[in-house]
Amino acid sequence: MLIETLKSAARGARHLPDRLLHPWRRRSSLRRLARLPGPGTVLFVCHGNICRSPYAAAVARRLLPATVAVESAGFIDADRPSPPQAITVAGERGLDLSPHRSQVIELGHVREVDLIVVMDSEQRHRLVSSRPELGGRVVLLGDLDPEPITRRTVLDPVEQPAEVFRSCYDRIDRCVDVLAVLWRAPGGDGTQGQSGKLE
């Protein structure tokens, strides 16, 4: 029992910076996004492009202006479908992931994308280390979360029960809604939204 308690405490301490830095990271991300003139293309990226990024893209297509082209991609294995749990949970929210097939990110193509939204800092590092000019255009989705967080990463629910997908998709919903509110706000300054403000 003591060993498990110590392990749990160690895990919590490892992610303490994520919790403490979240308000600052969120404000920084919102300021950066507010400086964009309004992207023509948004690319959502996760590891395999079967669970998180296709769902985020589907939500964004529903919420963002029709003038914004929304895409998704991953780092591995093209032409895979979303798993049944992803399709089921997305379907509960009125979104159809059944036609989705994974795409592998093409670094040449990302130069043409106005905003790239990733799920964790390792994905950001992979993109920016290959294409340093992308630095100002890559945002971590979890940094936009309006609620207190335990992890900066939007955790991958792959091969997990539907309830894990629901929790993941709840967080994606919150974060993508922040993007939509930001770009619907008067003047695009990120200060006004559905409840009157983002902060």
Image (cartoon, rainbow, N blue to C red):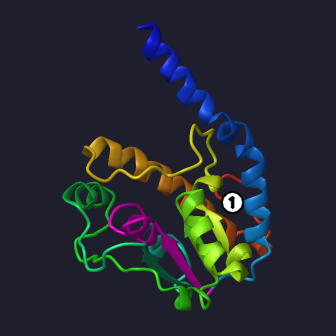
Q: Nearer the viewer, residue 16 or 66?
A: 16
What's the residue at 74%, 45% (across, down)? Answer: 23
Q: Quadrant of the N terminus?
A: top left
Mark 1, Cα crowd under 10 Å, few <14 / some 14-19 / many 20+, is some
User: SS of the residue at dot 1?
Assistant: loop
Q: Nearer the viewer, residue 158 or 10?
A: 10
Residue 130, quarter of the rendered image: bottom right
- Let me know if residue 106 is in the magenta part: no
Whether residue 37 is situated above or below residue 175 in the rendered picture: below
- Residue 83 % position (x, y): 23, 61
- What span is in magenta? 40-58
What's the residue at 35%, 47% (across, down)? Answer: 166
* Amino acid at dot 1: Gly
Task: Say how many tags the image has.
Answer: 1
Q: Nearer the viewer, residue 82 or 10?
A: 10
Left or right for 49, reference 176: left
- Residue 144 % position (x, y): 64, 55
Left or right for 164, reference 110: left
What's the residue at 41%, 61% (across, down)? Answer: 52
Looking at the image, can residue 197 be seen? no
Left or right for 170, reference 178: left
- Residue 190 % position (x, y): 75, 64
Whether residue 94 is situated above or below residue 160 in the rendered picture: below
Q: Disc 1 designates what residue?
A: 193
- Residue 165 % position (x, y): 34, 49
Residue 116, quarter of the rendered image: bottom right
What's the residue at 59%, 74% (across, down)? Answer: 127
Looking at the image, can residue 45 be seen? yes
- Let me know if residue 50 is in the magenta part: yes
Q: Nearer the viewer, residue 194 or 51?
A: 51
Name the outermost residue toward the top.
2
